[in-house]
Image (tube, helix red, strand yellow):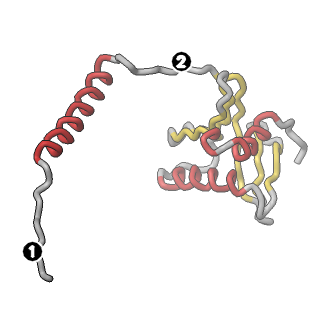
Amino acid sequence: MSEAIQIRPFPRGALIAAAGLVALSIVAAGAGRLSGVGVTRMPAAVPVQSRALHFSDRHDGAVEVTDTDARVVAVLPPGTNGFARGVMRGLARARKLEDIGQQPPFILTRWADGRLSLEDPSTKQHINLEAFGATNSAVFARLLTGESSKP
């Protein structure tokens, strides 16, 4: 009943072929990157609409969004707008690490190709909001297009 287990070595030709394929892929990717062959470049989009905004926490837990003239653009009630709060929390953390206060505004921009982005010029962080889906980017789109309201 006990038969010896035959140990078969992995085929040497398959290993050499796999190593050759990996090496060829790396060489082709490097050549394409250096020469530009096979590389698709997107034309630079121009900004269509832009707005400088300040975000500040209120004592009741809401987030108040104001423009550069201190006019209230929106109030994000507590327990809502989790995506906007998360994005702003990340940007505020970067500012805190670099000892930058809340004074510099964030720049919300709609581009000619339809993209929407939020930028912090003081930390050089740039977030492409459409990457998070239409529902999440719509939260910021309302801040861009909404009329300012009196505080």
Q: Which amino acid does label 2 sit on?
A: Pro
Position of 124 with respect to 111 (left or right) is left
Q: Which of marks 2 and 1 is in front?
A: 1
Give the CA distance from mark 2 to mark 1: 66 Å
Query: 149 and 41: which one is in front?
Result: 41
Check disc 2 and report the residue beneath it.
43
- The secondary structure type at the circle numbered 1 is loop
Position of 93 with respect to 103 (left or right) is left
Residue furthest right as drawn: 150
User: Could you tell which of marks 2 and 1 lies nearer the N-terminus?
Assistant: 1
Determine whether label 2 and label 1 are within 8 Å by CB: no
Relative to 61, say whether 4 is above or below: below
Q: Which amino acid does label 1 sit on?
A: Ala
Query: 119 and 116: which one is in front?
Result: 116
Asked which quadrant contains residue 107, the reply is top right
**Whole-percent x, y for residue 91 in the image:** 57, 50
Q: Bin the neighbour count of mark 1 within 10 Å (Cα to Cα): few under 14, some 14-19, many 20 and up.
A: few
Asked which quadrant contains residue 138, the reply is top right
Check disc 1 and report the residue beneath it.
4
**Whole-percent x, y for residue 26 in the image:** 25, 33
**Whole-percent x, y for residue 8 in the image:** 11, 60
Query: 58 and 144: which one is in front?
Result: 144
Position of 50 with respect to 73 (left or right) is left
The residue located at (69%, 51%) in the rendering is: 84
Query: 54 and 74: which one is in front?
Result: 74
Q: Bin the neighbour count of mark 2 within 10 Å (Cα to Cα): few under 14, some 14-19, many 20 and up.
A: few
The residue located at (77%, 44%) in the rendering is: 66
Residue furthest front as drawn: 1
The residue located at (62%, 51%) in the rendering is: 87
**Whole-percent x, y for residue 128 in the image:** 59, 38
- The secondary structure type at the circle numbered 2 is loop
